[in-house]
Image: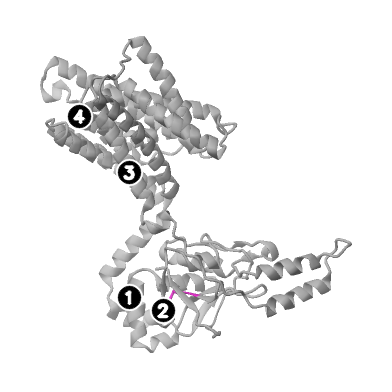
Amino acid sequence: MPLLNSKIVSQILPTVVNNSNKVDKNSVITIAHKLLKSPLKETPIKTNNSLTDRIPAYGLICAVLSVICWSLSSLIVKILTNLHSIQILVFRSIFQLVFYGTCIAIKKYPLFGVYGHRIDLVLRSLSGTVALSSIFMAYRMMPFSDASTIHFSSPVFVTVFAYFILKEKVSILQVITGVLTLIGVTIISKPQFLFGSESQVIHMYRLEGIGLSVLASVSAAFAIINLRKLKTTPAAVVVFWFAFSIIICGSIGLVILNQFVVPTNLWSWTLLIAIGFLGIGDQYFLTKSLQYESAGPVSVARTFNIVLSFIWEATILAEPIEWTSVTGAVIISTCVVALAIVKWQTEKPEFFEKIYNSMICCSKHSAKDFHDVDQLKTYPQSLRSSTNSLNVIALNNCSAGGPEIVSAARSQYGVPYSWGGGSWKGKSTGTGIGAHTIGFDCSGLTQYAVYKGTGKIIARTVATQYTDIKCKRVAYGSKQLGDLIFYGNPPYNVGIVSDSNTFINASKTGDVVKEQTIYSTNRQPYVQRCF
């Protein structure tokens, strides 16, 4: 979308409406002349240097950090045996309550959540309380890795609850993973009729631990279902009431059981403070990961907790790892990862389609394959006559980028220009003078073409596409098919390179998407490559 000089806008806007509050036709004509004659102010463009733009896969990194914080918290529960596990959980939650309560006060979030979802907030808090209380106690009764494996099988139970509560359909894969998960849990529990007898005390503790782990997994699944209903409630509010619920319920439980103990040594206090900060980190990084990444890949990343639990068990806890634990962990982890990948594919089909196309293309074609006459018919005459250009086409096609972008843009030939119209989803009604036209403006067309060609969703406006971290600056003389070409500084127009001397563009109101000659100005156009 073109950018207007702010000084001119401020000077001419008051002249549009006369004293009788009617639009003055002569003023509108004067405005048009001023806009056409006024040069754009040459100002340097600021590059977006935010942390999320500079770090690739920021969402997945946050998911892994969340897993590390959770895993270390669980390890502390296993180590700090002189305190009841519920007391450790209460102490952990006090840190969260203070931290997220401060966030609510600073951000001025609604303390009691969004009206209409407060019951969901209560259910999420209570189910989360049951889940954490159960798993913290299970860590004391059975091998660390076994409890962690069963606890992280919650995505399988989410499927069951989603069917009954949210009325979502159940696929064959979900049924199979559900059955396999139960088999994995059975192997971990080592029933005596299958694996022989073991110490009666150990067996009873194992069964209690299995029961608590399953309860934790089921409760966590129920909490996730309620979280789906709290999309409009700030995360800080959700965590605040979750921590509040744990503190109240846990404190009551400790009083009834007469299990509250005041730590008497520095080591215990150090571990309690550590688990408090780790609890904050776990929730913070988990929230961040879901803000910048979809649930599918985050679920895959969080299964890393099972690997960490085996590492802690073999190194720090020095406990023997049984083959049943490994077998059950492999079965359950495979089921969880399979469900997560399917969900990921549903959320971002273009990502998997791009990988598939790249694999097929790069395995079946080389540069010489594109000298075929039928293949060349799809490219401009000037490129068909150039050996160098053929090589560029072949390389680009194998990387699933440039030609696909051009093809997507050409599929929109003849679509009307619409100010503010279009996005990665396709043509749409614009804004302002484009409010009654379904089509594209220049940056709407490029965003759509890049998405269809590569699966990337780049920024929406001309200026932000020019600095988009997903693309890279290339020299004008090195431009290729599918590159974005920008005019002006700050840029006010963008198109897609379709040949050595042409580009595809949606340029102005009254015009359509079309191919035109790359025009020359007093400065060389800028080029961005987004594939």
Q: Which of label 3 and label 1 is nearer to you?
A: 3
Q: Which mark is residue 395?
A: 1
Q: Which of label 4 and label 3 is nearer to you?
A: 3
Q: Which is nearer the N-term, disc 4 or disc 3?
A: 3
199 w.r.t. 364: above or below:
above
SS for dot 2 = loop
Left or right: where does residue 456 sit relative to residue 4? left
Q: CA distance from mark 2 to mark 3?
A: 38 Å
In percent of width and height, residue 43 lies at 56, 72
Q: Residue at x 28, y 31 (%)?
A: 74
Q: CA distance from mark 1 to mark 2?
A: 18 Å
Q: Which is nearer the N-term, disc 4 or disc 2?
A: 4
Mark 3 touches mark 1? (CB < 8 Å)? no
The part of the chain drawn in magenta is: 480-485
SS for dot 1 = helix
The furthest residue to the right: 20
Residue bearing the label numbered 4:
188
Is the stretch drawn in magenta largely helix, strand or loop? loop
Q: CA distance from mark 1 to mark 4?
A: 50 Å
Query: Which residue type does callout 2 highlight?
Result: Ala
Q: Is residue 481 magenta?
A: yes
